[in-house]
Image: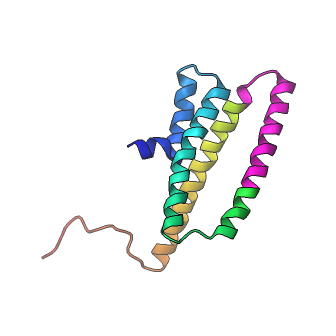
Amino acid sequence: MVGGLLGLGGGFILGPLFLELGIPPQVASATSTFSMLFSSSMSVVQYYYLDRFPVPYASYFVLIATIAAFAGQHVVRKIIAILGRASIIIFILASTIFISAISLGGVGIENMIVKMENHEYMGFEDLCLQS
């Protein structure tokens, strides 16, 4: 249960929950992101110990993610300074959740169509079993 709460899905739950509880957007965003850090770190450690962790590949993505995080933080700070409101963080969080939900639905539908075309098993059984 703790793993689910601190994982990526938990971060998407904690962010809006904190906002609903009246916590300022900056604090809500930082806290939910920080909680996701622990789940991600444990996954990295597990993959490393299982020898399934390509270090050069991971190092490249760590570098890109770090640069993107600093750039995003800089841009959001400038937007907050221009607008004088921190509500942009709420809109970014809501947009991310919306885009993720639409993408997940699209990928699921695409996978289902491919399986139907290839006559692959999708886990469904007949309601009326014949003996």
Above or below, comparing residue 43 to residue 37 in the picture: below
Q: Where does residue 44 sit, x and y in percent of width and height? A: 55, 58
Name the quadrant of the N terminus.
top left
Provide residue 3's location: percent of width, then percent of height. Answer: 43, 46
Question: Residue at position x 59%, y 22% from top?
Answer: 23
Name the one closer to the observer, 22 or 36: 36
How many numbered discs, if any?
Answer: 0
Residue 18 placement, left or right of 127: right
Toward the front, the furthest residue is 49
Query: For the point 74% across and 46% down, which residue is it?
Result: 69
In the rendered structure, the answer to whether residue 96 lies left or right of residue 72 reads left
Chief secondary structure of the magenta portion: helix
| Part of the protein shown in magenta | 64-88
Judged left or right of residue 90, residue 78 is: right
Task: Identify the residue at horizontal 70%, vertical 60% (top origin).
Answer: 61
In the picture as drawn, the residue positioned furthest to the bottom comes out as 118
Residue at left offset 82%, top offset 21%: 84
Percent across and percent down for residue 100 are: 60, 49
The one nearer the camera, 77 or 58, is 58
Q: Quadrant of the C terminus?
A: bottom left
Would you say 89 lies left or right of 124 here?
A: right
In the rendered structure, does residue 76 fall within the stretch colored magenta? yes
The spot of residue 64 in percent (x, y) is 76, 57
Is 105 located above or below residue 11 in the figure? Answer: below
| Scheme of image coloration | rainbow
Q: Is residue 15 magenta?
A: no
